[in-house]
Amino acid sequence: MNLLEVTELTKNYPTFTLENVSFQVPAGKIIGLIGVNGAGKTTILKALLNLIPVDHGKVTMFEKYFLENEQSCKQKTGVVLGGIDFYKEKKVKDITMVTKRFYDDWDETAYQKFLKLFSLDPNKKVKELSAGMRVKYLIALALSHQAKLFIFDEPTSGLDPVSRDELIEIFLQIVKDGDKSILFSTHITSDLEKCADAIVYIKEGKLVKEAPKQEFIAYFQKLKRPNETAMLSLEDIMVRMEGKHYDF
């Protein structure tokens, strides 16, 4: 079963076009969405959640047409998008009090567990949280309402290496029973090396390659230089696909 199916997603802007992007997120899998800044990753995530209108394409969640079942689909979707912030003078506990009213299956026990795991003080104001702690708070909210599909935009950005490893371990625990899935975009490709089952690569608004991680990495070994013997990593692949050559 696919928890998410994106079919020919297209969005036209004056200076950028997301063109006919299609991919799937099967149950029990972690899917990494990669590409440089401006490639279209965030546009994809916003479009599939109907945060921006699309010009063409279809999104299916939980085997339902998303636009016709948006409210019920979002009840089962945990989302962390970059660029979202809260009132800086509000305390964490006050924001949570408002947020949890939107979810029928809010799990207070789970929420308290993640507050403790992430060392989040509910009495602190948002302005007192570091960038990394704000990300952790958003993730705690996403994990606390019995979601089945998690959509994360740069979830490990701003976190130190130890916190990133903790988060990757949580991701692996989330999908281990086979009924939940994660789609997340990241520039930190080493995180995907540790946990992703498949990679979706976007370049200049177009899908370059979607494949299981090892198949994806093997496909791009053709970028190796003649005298190289070591396997190219995901980071190596992106650098060679995106790198520009300058003459001085």
Image (cartoon, rainbow, N blue to C red):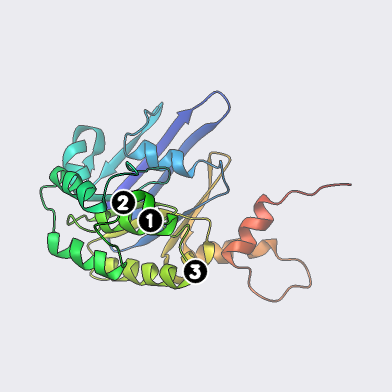
At horizontal 32% and vertical 69% (from top left) the residue drawn is 170
Q: Residues within 10 Å of mark 2 (few under 14, many from 20)?
A: some
- The one of 79 and 119 positioned closer to us in this rendering: 119
- Residue 125 is labelled as 2
Q: What residue do we see at 45% from left, 42% from top?
A: 42
Q: Amino acid at mark 2?
A: Lys
Look at mark 3 in the image and give the residue it sits on. 193
Q: Is residue 1 visible?
A: no
**Quadrant location of the N terminus in the rendered image:** bottom left
Question: On the rendered structure, is 127 left or right of 222?
Answer: left
Amino acid residing under circle 3: Glu
Q: Where is residue 47 shown, x and y percent of the image?
A: 38, 36
Q: CA distance from mark 2 to mark 3?
A: 35 Å
Secondary structure beneath label 2: loop
* Residue 110: percent from left, percent from top: 18, 64
Q: CA distance from mark 2 to mark 1?
A: 7 Å
Q: Which residue is mark 1?
A: 129
Count the numbered circles shown.
Answer: 3
- Picture quadrant where residue 168 is located: bottom left
Q: Nearer the viewer, residue 155 or 233?
A: 155
Determine contact: label 2, label 3, CB under 8 Å.
Answer: no
Q: Position of residue 37 (x, y in %)?
A: 57, 45
Quadrant of residue 140 in the image? bottom left
Q: Position of residue 183 (x, y in %)?
A: 37, 54
Mark 3 and mark 1 residues within 8 Å of each other at the beta carbon: no
Q: CA distance from mark 3 to mark 1?
A: 29 Å
Give whichever of 5, 71 is nearer the camera: 71
- Identify the image quadrant of residue 11: top left
Q: Along the polypeptide, which appears first: circle 2 or circle 3?
A: 2
Residue situated in front as seen by the camera: 3 or 120: 120
Q: Nearer the viewer, mark 2 or mark 3?
A: 2
